[in-house]
Structure formats: structure tokens, C-alpha cells
Image (tube, helix red, strand yellow):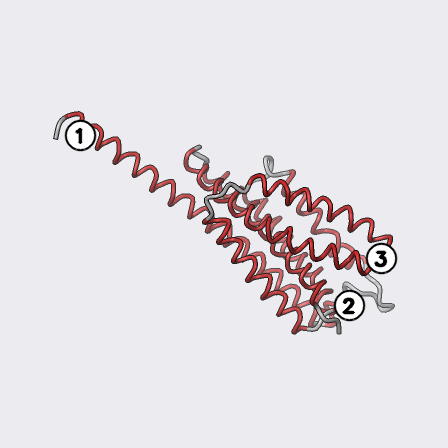
């Protein structure tokens, strides 16, 4: 083998090793994102079931007259505050603080979901949860494996999401069942699409972690934020399915 061939072979070997290492790092990052997401879902499930099935815990959320207590209102609106805090404080917070906020967010979201378990039959909740899990899993695989760039598609989904938010605010005053069903069906389509887009985005972030030399601290923070994104995709998909197909007690 000539010196030129040896040099070419050496460069090819180094490049191949770099690609393999980057691929491994990417897979590890994506796996950690899903692990954090599943942990959050588990925490939410435990807290939702605990409060829905225990009258003493439920009494902290609902007054004797049947309305929401102060803690009940906190449980309803605090999750939005946690999401904003994690998103806006990403650069300032350490990974430990983000983990703590994420765990607290999952717990208080689970508490707020206990109201859902009281409104709908357990059978319809389980069926909608299973349907959401199946749709989420399918779109996650699609988003991870597709070679098609979903950036433009993601922008369209986010524009549709803004439309859903505006329509929901309007329907808050109109209280139209028809509009509620329309919003719910569109919501299912939007969050199904966003799941594929967000998974592809997380995959690309995982690739950038290696190529840009991102440290362990920043990588963990990115994984937590990615897990929050996927958690919100799954949660909203589940809630919209429940609004369409859920049977009330």
C-alpha cells in the first residue's frame, strides 16, 4: 500500500470512528430524553391516582361546597408557571435545579389530572391513554427514522397550535360544544404532528451535542427540556382524545 493510500485509509478510519461516536452520543442523548419523559409520566400517574382515590387528599383540592380550594387552584394553574420557569430560566438554572423543577412539575400536573379521573370513567381514561401512547410511539418512530426534513411541517403545526389557543380562549366565553369538538379534533392532529417534529429536533440536538463539544451539564439540561417538550406533546394528545372519546361518570 502506498503512502498516499495509507494516509487516505487513516483519514477514513478516523472519520468513521468520529461518525460512530457521534451516532452513539446521539442515541444516548435521545434515550435519556425519553427516560426523563417516562419518569415524569410515571410521577404524574402516581400523583393523579393517589389524589383521585383518596378522599383525604382530595379534600385538600375541593371544598365542602364542591368548589376548588386554594390548593386546587394552585394545582390547576401552577404547571404553566413551571413550564415558563424552566423555559425562560434554562440558561441561568443548573441541571440540578431543572431536574427539581421538572419533577415538581410532573407531580403537580398529576395532582391536577386527578380531576380528570373524577370526571371520566376509568375505562375511557385507560382507553384514551393507550391510544395516545400508541399514536405517540408511532409518530416518535416516524420522526426519528424519516429522512424528510420536518422543519417547515413543524412551523405549520406551531401556527395551528396558536390557532387552537386563540379558539380555546374564544370558546371559554362562547361555551360551544361544537367548537369544542372541532378544537379537540384539530388538537389531536396538531400534537400528533408535533410529536414527529419534536423527536426529529431532539435527534438533531443529540447529533450537535457531539459535534459542538457540549459539556455534560449542558447536555443534561437539553435532555430535561427535550423531555418536557415530549411530555407536553403526549399529555395534550391524551387530553384531546379524552375530550372527544371520554365517557363521563
Indicate which label's residue lies in the foreground, 1 or 2.
1
Q: Would residue 71 be seen by someone viewing this image from the given angle?
A: no
To which residue does mark 2 refer? 59
How crowded pointer 1 is (Cα within 10 Å; few <14, some 14-19, many 20+) is rated as few
* 1 or 3: tag closer to the N-terminus: 1
Q: Residue at x 45, y 49 (%)?
A: 145
To which residue does mark 1 refer? 6
Residue nearer the viewer, 148 or 111: 148
State the CA–CA distance, disc 1 to disc 2. Answer: 76 Å
Residue 31 in percent (x, y) is at 46, 51
Residue 56 in percent (x, y) is at 74, 70
Left or right: where does residue 91 sit relative to residue 146?
right
Residue 62 in percent (x, y) is at 80, 65
Marker disc for residue 175: 3
Looking at the image, residue 235 lies above or below residue 197: below
State the CA–CA distance, disc 1 to disc 3. Answer: 74 Å
Residue nearer the viewer, 35 or 96: 35
Marker disc for residue 222: none
Residue extending farthest top:
4
Residue 45 in percent (x, y) is at 61, 64
Q: Residue at x 82, y 53 (%)?
A: 171
Quadrant for the N terminus in the image:
top left
Left or right: where does residue 67 sit relative to residue 89?
right
Looking at the image, residue 189 lies above or below residue 84: below
Residue nearer the viewer, 116 or 130: 130
Q: Secondary structure at mark 2?
A: loop
Q: Residue at x 73, y 45 (%)?
A: 163
Q: Would residue 135 be seen by someone viewing this image from the given angle?
A: yes
Amino acid at each position: 500500500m502506498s503512502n498516499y493510500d495509507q494516509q487516505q485509509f487513516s483519514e477514513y478510519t478516523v472519520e468513521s470512528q468520529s461518525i460512530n461516536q457521534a451516532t452513539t452520543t446521539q442515541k444516548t442523548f435521545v434515550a435519556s430524553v425519553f427516560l426523563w419523559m417516562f419518569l415524569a409520566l410515571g410521577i404524574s400517574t402516581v400523583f393523579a391516582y393517589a389524589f383521585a382515590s383518596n378522599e383525604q387528599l382530595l379534600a385538600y383540592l375541593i371544598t365542602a361546597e364542591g368548589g376548588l380550594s386554594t390548593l386546587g387552584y394552585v394545582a390547576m394553574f401552577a404547571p404553566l408557571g413551571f413550564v415558563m420557569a424552566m423555559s425562560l430560566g434554562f440558561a441561568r438554572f443548573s441541571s440540578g435545579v431543572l431536574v427539581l423543577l421538572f419533577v415538581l412539575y410532573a407531580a403537580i400536573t398529576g395532582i391536577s389530572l386527578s380531576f380528570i379521573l373524577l370526571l371520566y370513567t376509568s375505562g375511557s381514561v385507560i382507553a384514551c391513554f393507550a391510544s395516545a401512547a400508541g399514536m405517540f410511539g408511532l409518530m416518535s418512530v416516524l420522526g426519528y427514522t424519516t429522512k424528510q426534513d420536518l422543519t417547515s411541517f413543524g412551523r405549520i403545526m406551531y401556527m395551528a397550535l396558536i390557532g387552537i389557543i386563540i379558539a380555546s380562549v374564544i370558546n371559554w366565553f362562547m361555551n360551544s360544544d361544537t367548537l369544542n369538538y372541532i378544537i379537540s379534533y384539530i388538537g389531536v392532529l396538531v400534537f400528533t404532528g408535533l410529536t414527529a417534529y419534536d423527536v426529529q429536533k431532539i435527534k438533531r440536538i443529540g447529533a450537535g451535542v457531539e459535534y459542538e463539544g457540549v459539556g455534560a451539564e449542558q447536555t443534561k439540561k437539553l435532555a430535561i427540556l427535550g423531555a418536557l417538550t415530549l411530555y407536553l406533546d403526549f399529555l395534550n394528545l391524551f387530553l384531546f382524545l379524552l375530550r372527544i372519546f371520554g365517557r363521563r361518570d
